[in-house]
Amino acid sequence: MEQNLKDTLRRIKAIAYDLDGVATDGSIIPIGPDPEDLVRIVNAKDSFASRVASAKGFIVAVISGGKTQALHSRCLHMGIKEENLYLGVRGKLVVFKEFCERNGLDPSEAAYFGDDIPDTQVLRACGFGIAPADAVEEAKAAADYVTELPGGRGCVREGIELIMKAQDKWRFDEDHYELLY
């Protein structure tokens, strides 16, 4: 890993990400007449990495246009604290700046994962912008790093591992793994 990238990753204190197209593959399956009757599939490895990052001291947030009770519950399970959970968002840059301010962060200390046009401003404003392999071209162009894996298929895990390994925090004691939670 080149030194400039390592230096950038070592400054990261917070990790924020979009849901649809990042923690999910972007598929939304309606299962009933209510607008909240939807199925979204979240990758278990992405979920694990998010919980680990939170448990190891990173401030983890979700900034998403989606807003259902199921998403809310899933995000809490993924280690997102209520105060860092932003659902139903349309202006992501304003919310990202609010998140940074609320947590005493300079935007350069936060990484952000985004896959589509509404994410591009945040991808450029944060310290380390990450786009999934299957992101739209505008998001890839705005990002500092494009994962090898697509959204909903391990891209969150890949990016979090990259950050945590640069900080020597991606280490586990398998005999005491349950103590992380």
Image (cartoon, rainbow, N blue to C red):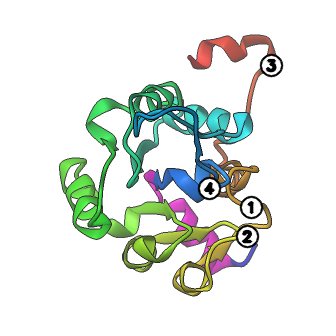
Find residue 173 and report its horizontal and vertical position in percent.
76, 22
| Residue 93 vs residue 175, the one in the foreground | 93
Left/right of residue 114 with respect to residue 178 in the rendered view: left
Residue at 60 percent across and 58 percent down: it is 21
- Circles 4 and 1 in contact, beta carbons < 8 Å: no
- Circles 1 and 2 in contact, beta carbons < 8 Å: yes
Label 4 and label 3: CA atoms lie apart by 33 Å
Three-letter amino acid code at the position of disc 4: Gly
- Circles 1 and 3 in contact, beta carbons < 8 Å: no
Give the labeled residue for mark 2: 133
Check disc 3: other Cα within 10 Å, few if <14, some if 14-19, many if 20+: few
| Residue 81 vs residue 132, the one in the foreground | 132
Label 2 and label 3: CA atoms lie apart by 30 Å
Quick one: SS at disc 1? Answer: loop
In this rendering, the answer to whether 141 lies above or below 19 is below
Find residue 95 and report its horizontal and vertical position in percent.
25, 59
Label 4 and label 1: CA atoms lie apart by 10 Å
Q: Give whichever of discs 2 and 4 has the lower sequence position.
A: 4
Q: Give whichever of discs 2 and 3 has the lower sequence position.
A: 2
Quick one: SS at disc 3? Answer: helix
Give the labeled residue for mark 3: 174
Give the labeled residue for mark 4: 26
Q: Nearer the viewer, mark 4 or mark 1?
A: 4
Say whether residue 77 is magenta.
Answer: no
Label 1 and label 2: CA atoms lie apart by 5 Å
Quick one: SS at disc 2? Answer: loop
Residue 99 visible at all: yes
Give the labeled residue for mark 1: 150
Instruction: Indicate which disc residue 112 carries.
Output: none
- Circles 2 and 3 in contact, beta carbons < 8 Å: no
Find residue 177 and report its horizontal and vertical position in percent.
71, 17
| Segment tinted magenta in the rendering | 3-15
